[in-house]
Image: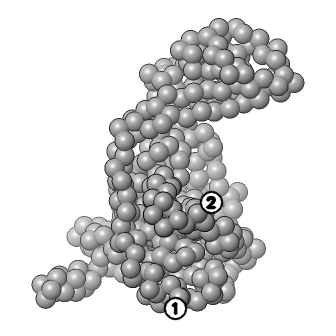
Amino acid sequence: MSRAPEAEAATQSDQKAFGQPWPDLNDGLFYSDVVSASDSRLTLIEFYSTKHKNSAPLQGWLQRIQNGQITIDGKAVKDPDTILSAGSELVYHRFPWKEPDAPYLLEVLYEDNDIIALNKPSGLQVLPGGLFQQRTVLKQLQWWASKQRSSLSDQESHPVPVHRLGRGTSGILLCAKTKLAKTCLAAYFADGTSKIGANSDMNLEHFTKKISKIYRALVSGIVVEDEIIIKQPIGIMRYPGVAKGLYVATVSGKPALSKVRVLERDLQGNKTLVQVAIQSGRPHQIRIHLAFVGHPLEGDPLYIAGGQPKSFDSELADETFAHDGGYLRPLAPVPGDCGYHLHAHQLTLSHPTTNEVLEITAPLPSILQTMEETKKLTSISKIS
């Protein structure tokens, strides 16, 4: 790995991994609203059952109100027919809950004063959302940074991820430790995507890259061509259980570009190991693009050939709600479900403050190694 010279010593002396076990329950959440003039004279139940109907059905909101989970200007109100006044502050308290199991250890691949690159395990969400509000990479970073500040008196470091990886995707996650690095790295990612949008007929080689990403993936079926360039646009469709909509392959979507290269074909298992280079960063781009060309990721519970979801049957027929008043989890797959094999393997970037070229690599899971790579690793382990 090449790295900025001044970062060498710090990188070698830093710990190789960090993380602390998750508490049994998270801290719960508080959601605030201020009543607008147009919403004044609504009742409390009318407000929540219309403004936040994606969170819970009518009966669920009634339960939450009667539990005393909603305050008006700091006072708990249990009468759902309370009339609201303009300017009043409403706060809904979502009680603490046990989040689904998730790994917590994060391997440090590279670190200096500006950035830290982590090897994210499959099954760990990057940012809070849905059922995962605490069990995220962001929370582990916050806990880690708090310990670092108390031990090193470093008040400047507030590490945050500058891009996302799907919950089921493993590999390199780049995080900024300073505001300057965050601004610069965010611009790198945005620039790559915007260039694809402005030059949809261009290949990856035409771009001056401030940052580039290479993934490994295991796909179903035998990919005949040695290389494929996929330029299928990606957009959003309504999908039950996903409030903001599901990303899919669609002609009305935004431009996206992926370059796929075959590494190994498993004729007996009817699977193909591929390398994927992307310049744009549309959500679930690799999963959608490979599915679009007829080779969904092996084990992907959501996307099928054509880059579309397997099922649309996740809408609940009635207003059944969970014990906390919210909707029950849809039975059909959603984007955060795991099971597929996708790994952010290599990342090359221009350092945000030194302009040195960094090349970062995350070790491959065994299932994403070629036979030759497995043999080489086996022989090395025998020697050692």
Q: Residue at x 30, y 70 (%)?
A: 365
Q: Earlier in the sequence, mark 1 or mark 2?
A: 1
Q: Is residue 337 left or right of residue 175?
A: left
Where is residue 250? Give x, y as percent: 63, 57
In the image, residue 243 sits, relative to residue 274, either above or below, namely above
Q: Which residue is mark 1?
A: 5
Where is residue 356? Give x, y as percent: 58, 89
Q: Which residue is mark 2?
A: 234
The disc labelled 1 sits on which kind of residue?
Pro
In the image, residue 190 sits, relative to residue 80, either above or below, namely below
Q: Residues within 10 Å of mark 2 (few under 14, many from 20)?
A: many
Q: Residue at x 65, y 8 (%)?
A: 79
Considering the numbered disc 1 on the image, is that residue within a helix, a strand or a loop?
Answer: helix
Q: Is residue 357 left or right of residue 99?
A: right
Q: Is residue 289 left or right of residue 375?
A: right
Considering the numbered disc 2 on the image, is that residue within a helix, a strand or a loop?
Answer: strand
How far apart are the two marked residues, 1 and 2, measured between alpha carbons? 40 Å
140 and 45: which is toward the camera: 140
Q: Quadrant of residue 200?
A: bottom right
Where is residue 2? Give x, y as percent: 47, 90
The disc labelled 2 sits on which kind of residue?
Ile
Label placed on residue 122 = none
Q: Quadrant of residue 189?
A: bottom right
In the image, residue 330 sits, relative to residue 127, either above or below, namely above
